[in-house]
Amino acid sequence: MFQTSVLSSGSKGNCFLVKNGSTQILIDAGITYKKYSQAMIDLGLDPNKLDAIIISHEHSDHVGGAGVLHRKTNSPIYITEPTWKDSIKKIGNMNAEPHFFDTGDFMHIGSLIIHSFTSSHDAADSNNFIIHPHDDDKKQLLIATDLGFAHNLLKYNLSKATTIVLESNHDVQMLKTGPYEWYLKQRILSKTGHLSNEQACDIMEDVINDNHERLILAHLSETNNTPEIAYGQMAFLLGKIQSKIKLSLSSQHEHTELFRV
C-alpha cells in the first residue's frame, strides 16, 4: 500500500515519510531521531526500517537531523553534490558515502520511483519530488515546499499528482507587520523564498483537476501564519470551485496520520 505521513513540517524541522509495502523512505530529515522514532512508533512502523533519506536542500530545517538518523538507522543518504558540499558540517560523520543524484534524475529505491526536479528556493541546488510505486504510475505523491513561485514544471507535476504536499508558509499581511527584520521579510517574499497562503491557493486554482484526491498544507510559519488562516483560505477556494479534494494540515509538533496515496 502506497502511503505518506508528514512527520513534521515548519521552520524548526521538516520530515516527510513515504511508504510503499516494505519500502520506507524519508524526504528530508530536519528533526531529531527521538522525534522521528516516536512518530514512527505512533504510526505502527519500525523506525529502524528505513531504505533511504533523500535531502531536498541544505537548510538546517531539512538536513539538521540527517546525520543522526543515518547513523542510527544505517540508511543511505541521497543528495546532490552542491547540497552535500553545503551540508557536510551539519551531517557529520557518515557510515557510508552519500548517493549523489542530479536534479531531474529518477531514483529507484525499493518499490518506489522518486523523480527530483528543481525548486525556486535560495539554496545551492534545491529540489522538490514526485513519487510513485514501480508498478503504478497512476498514484503519484508530490512534495513541494520551500519555493518562491510555481514554475511550469511544478505545475505540470502538480497536475499529475493524486496526493499533494504543498507549502502554505505565510500570511502576507502578518509577515509584513510581524517581528521579522526587513531583510528576512524580503527574502521570504522573494521569488526564491516561500509560498504564501494566497500563492498556494492561486497555484491550486490553476492546476486542480478530478485526478486530485488529497492536499496537505505544509511548512506553515508559526510567526507569520496560523493553521486557521491557511486552512480557511484553501478551504474557501476549494468550496468556490467545488473541488472534492480532501484538505489536511501538517504541523511542526505533531505528525499527520498515515494517508493512503
Image: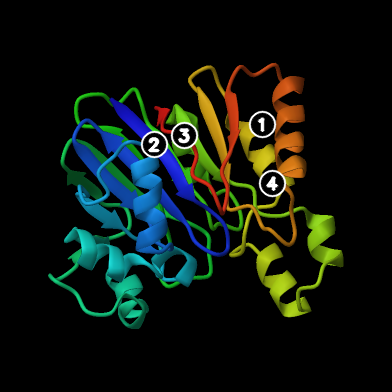
Image mark count: 4
Q: Would you place residue 113 above or below residue 88 in this image?
A: above
- Badge 3 crowding class, 10 Å Cα cut-off, few under 14, some 14 to 19, many 20 or more, is some
- Badge 1 crowding class, 10 Å Cα cut-off, few under 14, some 14 to 19, many 20 or more, is some
Query: Which residue matches tag 3?
Result: 257
Q: Amino acid at mark 4?
A: Gln
Circles 4 and 1: CB atoms closer than 8 Å: no
**In front of the other: label 3 or label 2?**
3
Q: Nearer the viewer, residue 12 or 155?
A: 12
Res 148 quadrant in image: bottom right
The Cα–Cα distance between marks 3 and 1, rounded to whole angstroms, is 26 Å
Circles 3 and 1: CB atoms closer than 8 Å: no
Q: Position of residue 213 (x, y in %)?
A: 50, 22
**In front of the other: label 3 or label 4?**
3
| Residue at the image position 62 percent from the left and 59 percent from the top | 194
Q: Position of residue 75 (x, y in %)?
A: 19, 58
Label 4: element kind: helix
Marked residue nearer the N-terminal end (3 or 2): 2
Is 16 on the left or on the right of 11, as rendered? left
Query: Which residue matches tag 2?
Result: 4
**In front of the other: label 1 or label 2?**
2
Q: Would you place residue 136 above or below residue 65 in this image?
A: above
Marked residue nearer the N-terminal end (1 or 2): 2
Q: Nearer the viewer, residue 140 or 64?
A: 64
Q: Amino acid at mark 3?
A: Glu
Query: Which residue matches tag 1?
Result: 205
The disc label shown at residue 199, or none: 4
